[in-house]
């Protein structure tokens, strides 16, 4: 195992990204129907189909409260372009809903448990961000979401995924190259195929990039 590539929360100093070939060749890119042409996301996001399935299962487990969890995976630099990308391999669902004071539990008490779980279950993976649902509210970052993201997921390679389970929509919020975080415009991702080269994406607010370019 390449230990230089291991990154821990809040310990980014001197971190090194491992070089790898970005897996564009086995991925489908999805982007918002209303694209922000000037956006320059700090990292490109690859989401495995397994992680996507687990996210959707958890997102649909409680349609009356916000639920969420953590995104787990690895950071890389593309061999060809030297550009950073992340691969979200799996998720850790939080064991409670995310309203009221539970938000603080999510961010504070659970951090200790999260570190333990990460070390036990996924010693070679890192915390790449978080996800949570906005039942009947839409895909955006609230002021609270922004505060939480800036304080607990401050690295440019850490992202926040918001899912609206009723309308089957979702999008990533992430820092741009200049360090800014847009709370209104979300980004799509690359769906990373696993066993079969067939998409399982069903969010209606994102479209395959080929389609977007043809319209
Ligand atoms: Zn939120």
Image: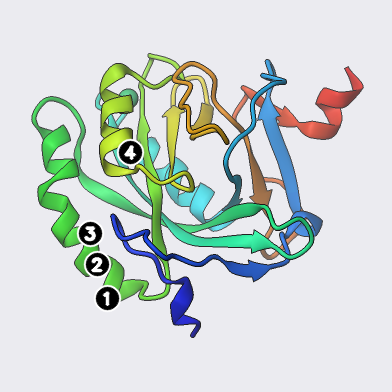
Pointer 3 residue Cβ closer than 8 Å to ligand 1 = no
Q: Position of residue 128 (x, y in %)?
A: 42, 52
| Residue on which the image places disc 1 | 120
Against 61, residue 168 (above or below) is: above
Q: Are marks 2 and 3 in contact (CB under 8 Å)?
A: yes
Mark 1, secondary structure of its residue: helix
Q: Are marks 2 and 1 in contact (CB under 8 Å)?
A: yes
Q: Do the residues labelled 3 and 1 touch (CB within 8 Å)?
A: no
Q: Return the residue nearer the eye: 95 or 177.
A: 177
Numbered tag placed on residue 189 in the rendering: none
Q: Quadrant of residue 154?
A: top left
Q: Where is residue 136 in the image (x, y as percent from the top left)?
A: 38, 15
| Residue on which the image places disc 3 | 114
Q: Please tell me which residue is depicted at 47% across the width and 44% down the height of the picture.
A: 156
Q: Tell me: 202 left or right of 148.
A: right
| Residue on which the image places disc 4 | 61
Q: Real-space Cα distance between discs 2 and 3?
A: 5 Å
Q: Real-space Cα distance between discs 3 and 4?
A: 21 Å
Pointer 2 residue Cβ closer than 8 Å to ligand 1 = no
| Residue on which the image places disc 2 | 117
Q: Please tell me which residue is depicted at 72% across the width and 20% down the height of the picture.
A: 37
| Nearer the camera: disc 4 or disc 1 | 1
Q: Return the residue nearer the eye: 66 or 83.
A: 83
């Amino acid at each position: 195992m390449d230990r230089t590539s291991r990154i821990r929360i809040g310990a980014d100093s001197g971190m090194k990204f491992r070089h790898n070939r970005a897996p564009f060749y086995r991925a489908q890119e999805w982007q918002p129907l209303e694209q922000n042409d000037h956006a320059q996301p700090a990292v490109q996001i690859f989401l495995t189909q397994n992680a996507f399935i687990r996210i959707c299962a958890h997102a649909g487990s409680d349609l009356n409260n916000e639920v969420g969890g953590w995104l787990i995976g690895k950071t890389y630099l593309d061999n060809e372009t030297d550009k950073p990308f992340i691969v979200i391999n799996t998720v850790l669902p939080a064991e409670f809903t995310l309203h009221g004071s539970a938000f603080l539990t999510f961010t504070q008490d659970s951090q200790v448990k999260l570190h333990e779980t990460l070390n036990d279950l996924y010693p070679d993976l890192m915390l790449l961000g978080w996800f949570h649902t906005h039942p009947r509210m839409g895909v955006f970052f609230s002021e609270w979401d922004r505060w939480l993201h800036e304080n607990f997921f401050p690295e440019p390679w850490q992202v926040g995924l918001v899912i609206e389970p009723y309308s089957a929509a979702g999008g990533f919020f992430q820092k741009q190259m200049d360090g800014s975080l847009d709370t209104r415009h979300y980004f799509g991702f690359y769906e990373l195929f696993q066993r079969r080269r067939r998409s399982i994406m069903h969010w209606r607010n994102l479209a395959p990039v080929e389609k977007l370019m043809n319209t």
